[in-house]
Image (cartoon, rainbow, N blue to C red):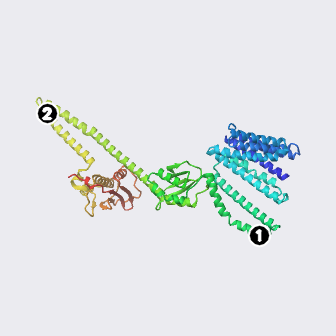
Amino acid sequence: MTAVLVAAAVLGVATTASGWAIWQSGRSRAAAALLVLGGVALLLGCAAAVLEVDRAAPPVFRSAAFLLLPLAVVSYPRLSWREPVSFVLLVVVAGAGVLSIVWESAADPMAYVLVVALLLHAWWAYERADARDRRALAWSSLAWGSLGAVVATTGLVAESAGAGSFVGLGTVYLVLLLAGPAAMAVGVVRPDVVDVRGLVTRAVVAGGVFVVFLSVALGLTSVVEALQGAPLAVTPVVVLCGLLAFCVRPLQVLLRGIVDQLLFGDRPDPLAAATSLADRIGDDPALALGAVREALVLPYASIRAGGEVLAASGTEVTHTRVLPLRLGADEVGEVVVGLRAGDLGLSPADEDVLRIVAPLLAQTLRARRMSRDLQRSREAVVGAVEEERRRLRRDLHDGLGPTLSGVAFATDAARNQVRTDPGRAEELLAQLRATTADAITEIRRLVEGLRPPALDELGLEGAIRQHAATLHSASGVPLPVTVDVPAPLPSLSAATEVAAYRIVVEALTNVVRHAAASRASVSLRVDDGHLALAVHDDGPMAAGWVPGVGLSSMRERSAQVGGTLTARATAHGGVVEASIPLGDGGAGRPT
């Protein structure tokens, strides 16, 4: 008796704590209040029994077991007494509970009424609940249903084996009942701590296997014993159990398929569905993810790269699995898939399918990234063009514009003075000549800013040699520059010529300004459809280069025509290397 009271007291504390936790969450307040009252009633019943108040303890215990706790389950996860079915179930549970309290002999039949009413409530509430309430109901139904199955099974076995074979079942039942209120609290406070759908499936399958084999074993032994008129010996029973053990796994697989179909619907064979994915995955990541979800019946799928979700399909779920997306040795991102209802993990077949389609998703991800890079490159080109136009406008407005205005004013002044003061007119014409020469110089500077004339006159190699011949070191000594072109250059596009020339000029300017170099070299060669250029100097530097305007300008010019550029300082001198596409030679020097 002492063990039973201790177990009841522990159950009372756990029930009160579970009700308080649900109350604190702000949801299912009615069920929370009833759980707290039920836990307090259990504690009061234990106190009455300890104080030997014999007439008070049984009604208090029955009020907790037959009224408060069943009402808490009916009110969970929300009280819906306005609906006809819910109202009838609520009245039935309350009436059965009150009748059990006031009439002790009615407790046993009312227990069956309560069980049926609670089962109907679980079905009705699940059918009408949303996704959040269904998770809470799944937790509650799993706990109370498992407890009911255990109680019913052990009760039947104890009855057939004799009451003395199972001593202390009441204490065990009370301890097991701790799972009920605890599961209700978890269903409200932390419903996603574990995927309860998988637990429900496993519990149903395990219970089904147990009931089937227990029924088969009891049936066969009863038939054999009835035929031979005597109990079976140990050896036949062991042989029968061994034979039944071989059927456990096939029955589990069969029941799992039946439960999956009943609870979660049909699922196609993922390996068969994978054959259609290759033709359905295109350049759009969202469409690709939709094809994967449809083929594998997944609730959610997304592609991430660098912690950023690039595309998603479906409704995000709590339980997911992550698989890397690789192209060769490079990891370009990862695919995140949500687990299906009833699954605690991906099946080996699903993982095989995802590994098959992962390279296709990786190619899709790379195509999207290349498209984004292309868009950025276009924006950079448009920005560079607009910046060049702004520079030209500024130079024309601030430089050439005032000069030409001065020419016009000087011409008017000379015309006014030509008869009255020829000497003054002659001075004005001399100033006009000088101003016109300045204007011509400014025009040449603007033209050279657009495209160096040397490129049209001498070609890329000649223009570079001409510029190299004019360089002097910081001390004023001419800087020897070697220009190496192993083979004649093909016809280059205008953009390629200008970019290459500007990069070489800027690199040599950096040598003159910043490197203590005694010589430099420039090499130009054609390699696999690209113009490869390199500028070397012999000015060693202890530290690396600090990126500045010059390096940024060279990189921008290379990127604008789809090329690449690297610049570094070494112990033997500076190195600038660029690879630029040859482009359309038809757009080269004018004829």
Amino acid on which disc 2 is placed:
Ala
Q: Residue at position x 60%, y 57% from top?
A: 345
Q: Which residue is mark 2?
A: 425
Vertical comparison of 549 with 230: above or below: above
> How far across and how far down the image is residue 317, in percent?
58, 49
Above or below, 531 relative to 26: below
Q: Earlier in the sequence, mark 2 or mark 1?
A: 1
Q: Which residue is mark 1?
A: 236
CB within 8 Å, label 2 to label 1: no
Question: Marks 2 and 1, how far apart in space?
Answer: 138 Å
Q: Nearer the viewer, residue 60 or 102?
A: 102
Answer left or right for 409 relative to 29: left
Question: Can you name the residue that lies furthest to the top here?
Answer: 420
Regarding mark 1 in the picture, which secondary structure is present there?
A: helix
Residue 430 appearing in the image: yes
Residue drawn at the location 34% of the way across and 57% of the way down: 578
Tell me the crowding category of disc 1: few under 14, some 14 to 19, or many 20 or more residues within 10 angstroms, Cα based.
few
Secondary structure category for the residue under label 2: helix
Please indicate whether residue 207 sits to the left or right of residue 477 in the image: right
Give the amino acid at mark 1: Pro
Q: Residue at x 39, y 48 (%)?
A: 375
Q: Nearer the viewer, mark 2 or mark 1?
A: 1
- Residue 313, horizontal then vertical, whole percent: 51, 49
Image location of residue 170, percent across then percent down? 81, 53
